[in-house]
Amino acid sequence: MRRKGLAIMAAQSVATSAETVETAVSGSPVDLGPATGLSCRECGTRFELGPIFACAECFGPLEVAYELPLGDPEALRAAIEAGPNNIWRYAPLLPVPADVASKPSLNPGFTKLVDAANLAKEFGVTGKLYVKDDSGNPTHSFKDRVVAIAVEAARAFGFTTLSCSSTGNLAGAVGAAAARAGFRSCVFIPHDLEQGKVVMAGVYGGDLVGIEGNYDDVNRFCSELIGDPLGEGWGFVNVNLRPYYGEGSKTLAYEICEQLGWQLPDQIVIPIASGSQLTKIDKGLQELIKLGLVEDKPYKIFGAQAEGCSPVSTAFKAGHEVVRPQKPNTIAKSLAIGNPADGPYVLDIARRTGGFVEDVNDEQVVEAIKILAQTEGIFAETAGGVTVGVTKKLIEDGHLDPTLTTVILNTGDGLKTLEAVAEGGGQTATIRPSLDAFRAANLA
């Protein structure tokens, strides 16, 4: 088994999580819609629904298993299209109760799929190029999707506090969702995050705790807290609720295909932090094929990393099966996870689909942020700069076909990472309030 890091975390917490399941669900069935249990990705062992994230047999990661609504794709498509303009239109395909849309929620999702004709021209793309712009979510990142699903699991299991380890965006999403849904929140971040993300995470009134170290240090601390009495009643959205949390990323796949007229894209470029978003988008595409909602055809998935934290792209290009941890050193702090939990599965998907995993340096990230802003009017955070920069590089190196339909993801708002583009930005000129001064500045 390739996931020794997860085995260490699981060994510390699986027994405590099992006790929590018994306490939380005793006396009442868990209603998470079509979800029927949890299944180990490595050995296939099945478990009942509960706040556990690792297999008790092999310590492999668990994911949600379903009884999907097979049999009448036209009726399912019509039901989805008649649903609310957020992720709850896909409730029959998610681990949430049927009445989820009536509960207090930030109702994220159904963000814009932007026809990026100007960016296509800039990059020499002759096929269709789209940007899935998730900066339009309530806290301005895709994390609102995954947290919304985790909140429903937290309700089902009787948790009273929502928590997470975060590189910034998730902290804000948890704080906001907890405030809306009536939970207490306490979230943990590296002490040196971008100030915009720190302020946004703190404004929702929950506890925000900086940990001295990087994200991997924060994550290790959270795994210890889960196994301690101090963490009793706490739902860590990306640890003991991780199987449910990850399913929120599937909604990106659902939306992209629906917005393309119920068609699969030929190519999709996805940023990699833990790798969960990429693996769950692939899972979502496979589910749509199985349900008959889209026509089955080949598609390629590409992963994007920052050079200063590129363990997956390094392994991919070296032909390795094992992702070796790295110490992050990049301006793309939302992607700065040196030991990505889903890294090996990203390698599998990129290779299976004929895709690639590439990285770009900080200078290229900044350049790409500006290119996207100046061609499409989309101000991406540094993770979006990574994705756009990698797309440019993939085209130049011949890995990505510019004649096909391609979707690239922008997962967050550039207002959160102003520091990255602050140098050299701002006012073009400062003049006196007169026409003569304006003429002298040669701006007309």
Image (tube, rainbow, N blue to C red):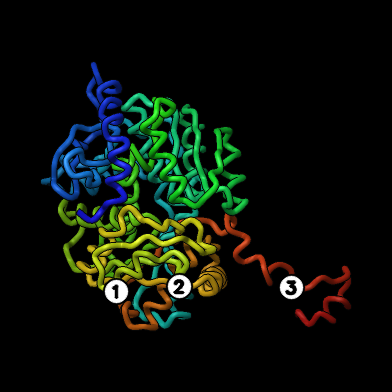
Image x and y of residue 302, in percent: 32, 68
Q: Mark 1 touching mark 3, by CB under 8 A?
A: no
Image x and y of residue 381, in percent: 53, 60
Q: Residues within 10 Å of mark 1 (few under 14, many from 20)?
A: few
What's the amino acid at mark 2? Answer: Val
Inter-mark Cα distance, 1 to 3: 45 Å
Q: What residue is drawn where x is 30% and y is 29%?
A: 16
Q: Secondary structure at mark 2?
A: strand
Q: What residue is drawn where x is 27% and y is 70%?
A: 266
Q: Quadrant of residue 10?
A: top left
Asked whether residue 21 is in view, the answer is yes
Specify which label sits upstream in the sequence, 1 or 3.
1
Q: Is residue 111 above or below residue 100?
A: below
Q: What residue is drawn where x is 34% and y is 65%?
A: 312
Q: Is residue 216 left or right of residue 403?
A: right
Mark seen at residue 428: 3
Image x and y of residue 31, in percent: 25, 28
On the image, numbered disc 2 is attached to which residue? 360
Q: Is residue 391 left or right of residue 285?
A: right
Q: Secondary structure at mark 1?
A: helix
